[in-house]
Image: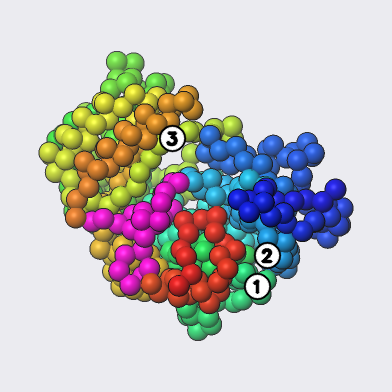
């Protein structure tokens, strides 16, 4: 039975793709709606996304990636590329098209002496980090271990080492990229330099990254973990001020939120505003105590899990059946003083979601020392990244929570009008444009025209061809 794309507005149908031929060509790594594993294979991390691809193909190498890309192009099928499936907009799955699933591409070659690693995009950040930590080495990714390294790298990569070592893309030395014409290109500072610039922050607009070469840093034991404090205008503003004044070795995330019923929290605090802080001192653990002590002194901690640990321990175990449904917005702020902190707490109290949160990440450090035009991530001077979100259960309440995050973000907005592409949801082109300020947008459009003029790679925060 031929596989066909969903009907378009022009009612065009894709040319037939023989499923038996596909299964033979890809050694059985082909999943269609009749297969028992289909529903699991099409499920992505975030809930509320229910799309039914015509076929899911699990490529095993760059040649397989090239063949799937060519099949999609030649048959006019919408192409979704999946690494870890964490796209907040659901771009990891398509309705009626082909999903190129990279989850089986998990090779990792570590050059301990040279401090580099070649990694395939099916690896998660947690898996990569655990493997490199065996040698006392690390590359900075995000704050969630189950995220695929493909998507987070292409968008920039803001995580626990951002102030010490910069973004993930600042440690990207080279990549293997399959372009829309099916070619497999090696890109770095000397080869296809325009494409190498674009994939460092430009997302999946220019091809499929089938391998990455990363720089590794000596990161063995760290000092850090979770610190939960009562959230007041003073503690929130002071937490941010301390994070900004801290040495580069310290990266922090302050989740200002209503306290969930965690067993280690006093019952009387459940539902009350707290700062669920994550603090990582990526230097000599012996020097971390005096750096973190001022945070502990802000108020009597409700929970204090900060300790010396191995770096991979910062990623908690993942719940495989956890698929949150959330309304969210991402933005940058210039500062958070007591009045802004008070407004954040007021807006959180106004949410009717099952959980409301404002995530505050102080940037700076090594990330800010890279010139703004060195990569497609141009927000080097941005001070604080903020994500506001409301989690909810009932789909019919979506409009209520979307209105809340829209109003919240509008009230928070300051001079920095930028956005981080990896945290954008289902947005219009104006918000995508905000992720690429100034001449970055025009330069990306020109590179898009060279490598993907027909916009085959459009299931992403899309950059149109010039």
Picture layout, residue 89 above or below residue 369? above
Numbered mark located on residue 73 in the image: 2
Badges 1 and 2: C-beta atoms under 8 Å apart? yes
* Discs 3/1, front: 1
* Inter-mark Cα distance, 3 to 1: 36 Å
Numbered mark located on residue 326 in the image: 3
Q: Which residue is mark 1?
A: 181
* Discs 1/2, front: 2
Numbered mark located on residue 155 in the image: none
Q: Decide which of tag 3 and tag 1 comes sooner along the chain.
A: 1
Position in image of residue 224 (x %, y %): 36, 44
Q: Nearer the viewer, residue 65 or 146?
A: 65
Residue 164 visible within the image: no
Picture layout, residue 147 above or below residue 369? above
- Which residue shows up at 54% across the image and 68% down it? 206
* Inter-mark Cα distance, 2 to 3: 33 Å
Q: Is residue 439 magenta?
A: yes
Position in image of residue 446 (x %, y %): 45, 75
Magenta highlight range: 416-441
């Amino acid at each position: 039975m031929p596989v066909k794309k969903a009907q378009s507005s022009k009612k065009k149908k894709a040319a037939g793709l023989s499923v038996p031929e596909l299964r033979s060509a890809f050694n059985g790594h082909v999943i269609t709606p009749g297969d028992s594993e289909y529903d699991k294979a099409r499920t992505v991390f975030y809930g509320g996304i229910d799309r039914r691809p015509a076929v899911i193909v699990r490529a095993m190498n760059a040649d397989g990636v090239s063949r799937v890309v060519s099949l999609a192009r030649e048959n006019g099928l919408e192409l979704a590329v999946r690494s870890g499936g964490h796209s907040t907009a659901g771009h990891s799955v398509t309705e009626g098209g082909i999903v190129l699933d990279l989850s089986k591409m998990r090779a990792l070659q570590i050059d301990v002496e040279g401090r580099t690693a070649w990694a395939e995009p099916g690896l998660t950040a947690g898996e990569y980090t655990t493997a490199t930590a065996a040698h006392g080495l690390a590359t900075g990714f995000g704050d969630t271990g189950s995220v695929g390294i493909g998507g987070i790298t292409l968008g920039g990569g803001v995580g626990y080492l951002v102030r010490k070592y910069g973004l993930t893309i600042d440690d990207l030395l080279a990549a293997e990229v399959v372009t829309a014409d099916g070619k497999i290109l090696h890109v770095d500072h000397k080869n296809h330099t325009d494409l190498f610039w674009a994939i460092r922050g430009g997302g999946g607009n220019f091809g499929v990254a089938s391998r990455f070469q990363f720089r590794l840093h000596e990161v063995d034991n760290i000092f850090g973990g979770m610190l939960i404090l009562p959230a007041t205008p003073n503690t929130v503003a002071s937490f941010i001020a301390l994070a900004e004044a801290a040495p580069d070795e310290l990266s922090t995330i302050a989740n200002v939120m209503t306290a969930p019923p965690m067993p280690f929290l006093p019952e009387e605090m459940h539902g009350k505003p707290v700062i669920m802080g994550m603090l990582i001192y990526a230097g000599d653990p012996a020097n971390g105590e005096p750096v973190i002590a001022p945070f502990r002194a802000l108020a009597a901690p409700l929970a204090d899990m900060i300790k010396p640990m191995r770096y991979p321990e910062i990623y908690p175990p993942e719940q495989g059946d956890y698929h949150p449904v959330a309304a969210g917005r991402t933005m940058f702020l210039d500062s958070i003083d007591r009045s802004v902190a008070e407004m954040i707490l007021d807006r959180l109290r106004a949410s009717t979601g099952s959980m409301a949160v404002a995530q505050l990440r102080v940037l700076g450090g090594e990330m800010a020392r890279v010139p703004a035009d060195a990569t497609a991530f141009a927000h080097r001077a941005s001070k604080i990244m903020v994500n506001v979100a409301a989690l909810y259960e009932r789909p019919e309440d979506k409009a209520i929570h979307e209105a809340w995050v829209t109003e919240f973000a509008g009230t928070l907005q300051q001079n920095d009008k930028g956005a981080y592409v990896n945290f954008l949801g289902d947005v219009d082109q104006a918000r995508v444009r905000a992720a690429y300020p100034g001449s970055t947008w025009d330069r990306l459009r020109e590179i898009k025209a060279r490598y993907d003029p027909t916009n085959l790679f459009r299931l992403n925060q899309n950059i149109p061809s010039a």
